[in-house]
Image: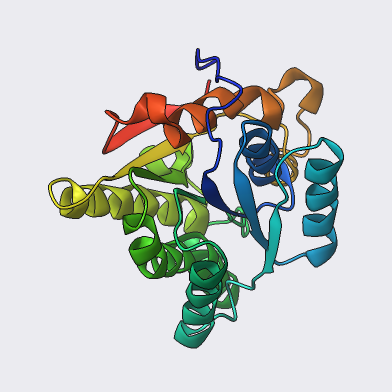
């Protein structure tokens, strides 16, 4: 497991947007960021789940979160611009962006892969990450020192047979992060890194490995040290790198 102990005030007064914040790793990250003092913008499709995370943050006595329902499959340029305008009006900047929302699709040979499913996976896991990052860059540039994190996968660093669109989307995510790092390296104080969570007990993991015993896997909250490290000031020297959560 990544070795890092976050200070209690690591993200005090920071504004952090988390996509896929309603469950799994996104939820764990949102709770961890709030616990360290951040005002977290909870982004996802399921409003009920976002409200549950919002309530957990409030009940813990952490900074009040904000809820932003968002459908990555249906979103167009106007919707992304509305999102950015709303954040700018409410907060004026972003100190961090966690691109985490993903879907698995199906585990099947390329020859049998359903085209609609393929497009939905690529749209959610890649195109939406690009669009959200693109439109949020002006907000991130308003911060003194900001961080962009992409949740990647071991399937994105090495091709997996039968993982189809998911593996392709995560490989492309790694490339997107690399291109973004090179473009921003000498022109801004925005750092860009990717995280491979490893085998973690999430709903997506159970879809991919239904026979696996989740009790033998790391829990989402167990892998938060690297997510906290890369979002906070202690990682200001880390840029353009690939990290493993465990």
Q: Is residue 33 left or right of residue 141?
A: right
Residue 70 % position (x, y):
64, 71
Q: Which residue occupies 59% across, 70% down?
A: 117
Q: 166 or 220, which lies in front? A: 220
For residue 13, which quarter of the picture? Answer: top right
Which quadrant, please, contains the N terminus? top right
Q: Is residue 38 left or right of residue 245?
A: right
Residue 12 % position (x, y):
56, 36
For residue 219, which quarter of the picture? Answer: top right
- Coloration of the structure image: rainbow
> Is residue 57 something that shows in the picture?
yes
Q: Which residue occupies 32% across, 50% down?
A: 177
Residue 47 vs 164, above or below: the answer is below
Residue 132 % position (x, y):
45, 66
Q: Is residue 109 left or right of residue 156?
A: right
Q: Which residue occupies 25% across, 47% down?
A: 178
Tally of numbered tags: 0
Residue 151 vs 154, above or below: the answer is below
> Is residue 100 something that shows in the picture?
no
Q: Which residue occupies 54% across, 49% down?
A: 16
């Amino acid at each position: 497991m990544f070795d890092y102990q976050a200070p209690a005030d690591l993200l005090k007064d920071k504004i952090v947007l988390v996509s896929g914040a309603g469950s799994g790793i996104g939820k764990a990250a949102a709770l961890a960021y709030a616990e360290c003092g951040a005002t977290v913008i909870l982004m996802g499709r399921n409003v009920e789940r976002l409200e549950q995370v919002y309530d957990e943050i409030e009940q813990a006595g952490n900074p009040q979160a904000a809820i932003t329902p968002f459908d990555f499959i249906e979103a167009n340029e106007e919707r992304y611009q509305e999102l950015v305008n709303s954040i700018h009006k409410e907060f004026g900047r972003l100190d961090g962006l966690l691109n985490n929302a993903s879907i698995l699709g199906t585990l099947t040979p390329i020859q049998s892969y359903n085209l609609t499913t393929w497009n939905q996976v690529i749209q959610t896991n890649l195109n939406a990450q690009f669009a959200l990052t693109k439109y949020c860059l002006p907000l991130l540039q308003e911060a003194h020192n900001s961080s962009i994190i992409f949740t990647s996968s071991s399937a994105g660093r090495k091709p997996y047979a039968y993982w189809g669109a998911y593996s392709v989307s995560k490989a492309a995510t790694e490339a997107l992060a690399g291109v973004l790092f090179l473009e921003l390296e000498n022109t801004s104080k925005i750092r860009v890194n990717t995280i491979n969570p490893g085998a973690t007990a999430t709903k997506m993991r159970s879809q991919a490995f239904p026979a696996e015993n989740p009790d033998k896997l790391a829990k989402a909250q167990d892998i938060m040290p690297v997510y906290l490290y890369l979002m906070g000031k202690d990682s200001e020297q880390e840029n353009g790198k690939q990290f493993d959560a465990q």
